[in-house]
Image (tube, helix red, strand yellow):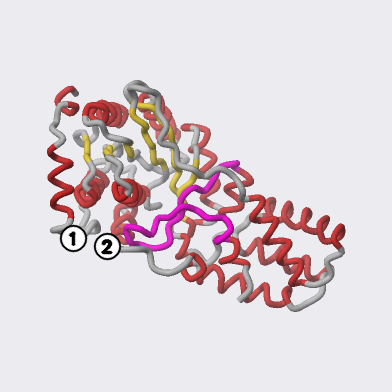
Amino acid sequence: MLSLALLPWAHRTWTNSQRSRRTPSIGTELEEDRAFEHFDDRDDVHEMRETSVHEEGVPSGSMRERLSKARGMISARLSGIRGGPVNSSMWEELEEVLILADVGVDTTLDLVNRLQDRAEAEKLEKGTDLLEALKAQMKNDLSRDRELSLTASKGTVPVWLFVGVNGVGKTTSIGKVARRLTDDGLNVLLAAGDTFRAAAAEQLEKWANNCGADFVRGSEGADPSSVIYDAAEAALAREVDVVLADTAGRLHNKVNLMEELAKVRRVADREPGQVSEVLLVIDATTGQNGLSQAKEFTEAVGVTGVVLTKLDGSAKGGIVFAVERELDLPVKLVGLGEGDLDLVDFDPESFVEALFGDD
């Protein structure tokens, strides 16, 4: 354990110096881990697809452009409302649009009921005015603190735990967050806490090498809690600013996974580590199914925020509203592409305008 903490800082210095001279592919072939049959091999394949295109540089396009798939579906259905009067059939159309956008039935009914009260109070008669009121209401509903915390007590290191089922892009998200933080000048350590899937550790190590982060892993099948604890010790000795820890991601209805994650959460919060974020990674293309995942993980580990991946690939996107209302969890980061810099801070105003703004 102490040997990890005493590893020289030269590793980080060397990797930073090499960074400009290499362009490795994060998505090289990943070996399927067959040591544990209760894992679905398709999860590794899914991760490979997400990382097979490694793109450097700034993210391309605005949120409006990147959400064109969802915007196209919603905009086509809003055109009739935008050009018509406020009446009973229009309310039904609006409910249908929101439900199709994956906002969720309960969240949709709440949105529409409050909008009806406002329309009556302000005597709104045109569809265009009603949609403006809807956007204002949505932006207000999404107004909350989304800052990622790097706060930790003196003598401890902040730890961010990433949780989620296999195949949602969890390991890739950790790599992209590491890239963001190292670009901002922070010293980062990646901890391979998913010890049941060798491919996850290999993939995470490639990300660490690419962005100049430190990396700690255990042997295959090792206790995930001990790996993350060792990572926190190493991070304190190396004066690292934050530990980003991967975790196992078996199916969320497996009780043993939740018990394991609860243990990881407790151990990660012991000195010298201090858990400052527990980020649940959800694939936006799964829609409402992501809510059941979120509920299970929140009960087990106390999720502090959501990372919504593949939002650009979803024809819906309304899951954002359901997550925030039904789970009272802030969406902190969203994935808008496969490039290193395409995992961005969630901006509610840009998001609402991208989905419901005028053409």
Image location of residue 146, percent across then percent down:
52, 44
* Mark earlier in primary sequence (1, 2): 1
Q: Is residue 143 magenta?
A: no
Instruction: For mark 1, give the secondary structure.
Output: loop
In the picture of the structure, the residue carrying the numbered disc 1 is 23
Left or right of residue 9, residue 114 in this image: right
Which residue is the extreme one toward the front?
Answer: 185
User: Which residue in the structure is indicated by mark 2?
Assistant: 54
Eye-nearest disc, 1 or 2: 1
Q: Name the residue nearer the viewer: 274 or 260.
A: 274
- The residue at the point 33 percent across, 45 percent down is 39
Give whichever of 259, 279 is nearer the camera.
279
Decide whether residue 335 is among the magenta residues. yes
Image coordinates of residue 156 in percent, x first then y, are 34, 25
Relative to 10, residue 269 above or below: above
Please name the amino acid that badge 1 sits on. Answer: Thr
Among the 4 quarters of the image, the one containing residue 343:
bottom left
